[in-house]
Image (cartoon, rainbow, N blue to C red):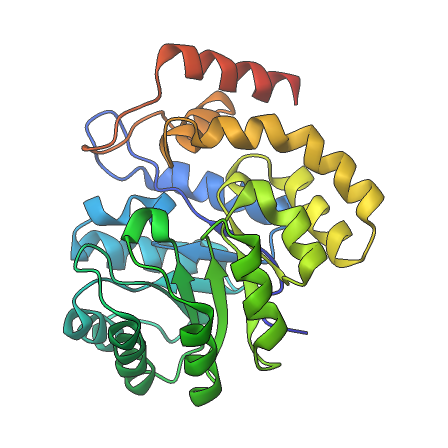
Amino acid sequence: MHPFRGTGVALATPFDSNGTIDYPALEKVINHVISGGVNYLVALGTTAETPTLNDHEKKDVLAFIIEKNNGRVPVVCGIGGNNTAEVIHQLSTYKLDKVSGILSVAPYYNKPTQEGLYQHFKAIALSTAKPIILYNVPGRTSSNIAPATAIRLAKEFKHIVAVKEASGSLPQNMEIIQNKPTHLAVLSGDDNLVLPQIAAGMEGVISVAANCFTRDFTNMVNLALADDFADARRLHYKLLTGIDLLFVEGNPAGVKCALSCMGLCQNELRLPLVPVSDATNNKISEFVRAL
């Protein structure tokens, strides 16, 4: 079984009212998602507001997640960026001995070609023996890891073990699934598409919604992976409105709102992100109460 099969959760980073990391709240979120059945934790992803964390905070958050997880589930660490040399430096300076894999996002803003993307991830793969999950999210990066590039990398480096596909393109997803080497898992990065993507051959998801709708969401994924699509479909439609609400004003503003409604953390974000509007807050709160 693939080590990243099932549901990974991209953990949010709770803050208090003065913008300081709220570690007791982070511990509550960790315990909540593990008790809800997630298969692994993802630290320092997009949902963690990683661009607003300084290097010291990133290392502290990673260490805290590893400590409070206490070996219960694997931990994946997000280490990526648009400066290849800096990514390689982080791989050599972060404490990764208890980390099961690296999630590395495609370079953003400087818009490399496919050859540039290949060379970027090749340099990363040559600098670490840790399992690597490529992260393709064109809506945030303005670059798209083409199926041929992901497959080329996976065939050359056996420790490139997965790609998180958040392109939202089922045809692109299926092209990778059809042509990939056997060791490469294709994981969803789009919570509202997980059910059809698993039907097409994906092996799981790295999820935002699993922070708050944990038990129903992980059950949906597990049922789909077991080919029980009737019951999985029921949970999919039970959650679909709530999943869409999480993203209507951006991530992680929506999930922070939901977690606040659940009493797990405060509804605080760091600029340039702000909380959702009152109208969206009311809709999310109503959904959480009904759920």
In which quadrant of the rendered image does the C terminus lie?
top right
Identify the residue shown where x is 64% and y is 31%: 239
Identify the residue shown where x is 74% and y is 58%: 225
Vertical arrangement, residue 201 with respect to residue 22, above or below: below
Residue 153: % across, % down:
41, 81
Residue 134: % across, % down:
41, 67
Residue 132: % across, % down:
42, 74
Relative to 233, 5 lies left or right: left
In the rendered image, the residue lying farthest to the front is 171
Q: Quadrant of residue 103?
A: bottom left
Relative to 234, 276 lies left or right: left
Vertical arrangement, residue 253 with respect to residue 40, above or below: above
Identify the residue shown where x is 31% and y is 48%: 140
Identify the residue shown where x is 40% and y is 61%: 135
Residue 264 can be seen in this image: no
The one of 203 and 199 positioned closer to us in this rendering = 199
Residue 223 can be seen in this image: yes
Vertical arrangement, residue 30 with respect to residue 148, above or below: above
Q: Quadrant of residue 58?
A: bottom left
Residue 286: % across, % down:
56, 14
Q: Quadrant of residue 181?
A: bottom right
In which quadrant of the rendered image does the N terminus lie?
bottom right
Relative to 183, 166 lies left or right: left
How many circles with numbers are drawn on the protein? 0
